[in-house]
Image (cartoon, rainbow, N blue to C red):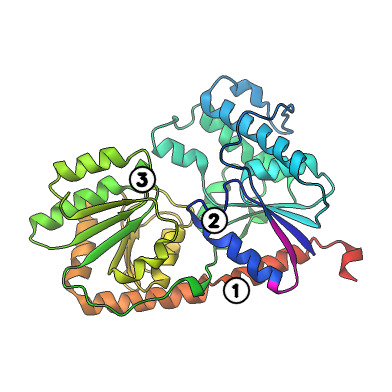
Amino acid sequence: MNVLQALFFPPEQPGGVSSMIPFMKERFVRNSWGMELFYLPRRLRGKGNEPVEFATFDWKAYRGHPVVDKYIQTYKDYVWWTMLRIRQRYDLIHAHHPIAALAMRQLFPETPVLLTIHSSYERELVLNGHIEADGPEHRFLTSLYHELEVKLEQILTVSESFKSYLSHYVQEPDKIRVVPNGFDERRFRPMPHENEVPQLITVCRLVPAKGLDILLAACSELKKRGHSFVLHIIGDGPYRPELERMAVDLDVYEETIFYGYMLHPEQFMPFFDIFVLPSRAEAFGSVFAEAALCRLALVGTNVGGIAEQIEHGRNGFLVPPEDAEALAEALAKLMEEPDLRSRMAGLAEKKAKSNYSLQRVIRQLAKVYEEYRRPEARG
């Protein structure tokens, strides 16, 4: 069976998709599947001019809004690039972004197209202050979910929580399947170590949706209480200058290291003690599974897929979003009790290996793919 994995971002981009799909492809190919990756180059913009029509709503009613216009042009660019580059036929196309899915459906109407929705673009835009909730851009983006439902053979997503979110925008939510992300265990090598001063680490894009303002406020509270620590922030984004100013204002700049973007943070993570990320929303939160596989204690917010990975009080702590005081309490407990920290880290690693192994996701996806194998290919 010959499968095309249609990404949006190039595979070297940070995030759950890029950290999983290339390794997944390698395993599938080793198991005698045909599989290729396809994506839109980052610098390719403004090339496409094919008309865009949707079956379930008139997108032109939203034309003139920047997010909508950019989305439609990117869709046109994806169609243009696909027409230019793809010449062969595939038995199945598995897309990992709505634009990729709709473009592939338009160009290959006879080929089954599946889509995994990894995150909510509109929710992140709202949280980051770029669009208004229930404004025209928000309505355009959420309207796409029903369009995808009508046009594709199958929609998958990465957590039960995000399936519940999608259920508000589709007509048959029960048909959505959940396949959590999977991770190649060979990438993660926990290292025995002893840090005299607790080392906190977070890995994310530096945008308001990730809640790092709450993390810095919690760290300020920890310092006021007399706790020693170092906070390592791996990632970059438009919010970084404001976060750096905030660290100064909260008197935690000396305790905080901003590294910028790092391609393979999992090589760095095993030397730290606690992974913390107080996201305001998260469809899955791949970085929590990655941190768990590095045997770190976990602290996250009780939102989305994070709450499906962390069992509060057992393999980590969950705190309410926007609550710096509760976050400081959870971090303080782990910093003060190294035995508890070690026990929770071990249980987090055990759960991640059991639930989020790459082999598990490959088995689940292979079963889905086989459902769409052409009769003549079953032999």
Residue 318 seen in the figure = no
Query: Residue 72, image x and y in percent?
Result: 63, 30
Mark carried by residue 18: 2
Looking at the rendering, the stretch of residues picked out in magenta corresponds to: 30-36
Mark 1 or mark 2: which comes first in sequence? 2
Tell me which residue sits at (59%, 32%) in the image. Answer: 71
Q: In terms of secondary structure, where does tag 3 sit?
A: loop
Measured in 3D between alpha carbons, the distance from the residue under mark 3 to the one under mark 1, in whole angstroms, is 31 Å
Q: Which mark is residue 251?
A: none
Q: Please tell me the numbered disc located at residue 359.
A: 1
In the rendered image, residue 373, in percent from the top left (x then y), is placed at 82, 63
SS at mark 1 in the image: helix
Pointer 3 residue:
206
Crowding at label 3, few (<14), some or many (≥20) Cα neighbours within 10 Å?
A: many
Task: Identify the residue shown where x is 87% and y is 69%.
Answer: 378
Q: Residue furthest top?
A: 64
- Residue at x 62%, y 65% (from the top left corner): 24
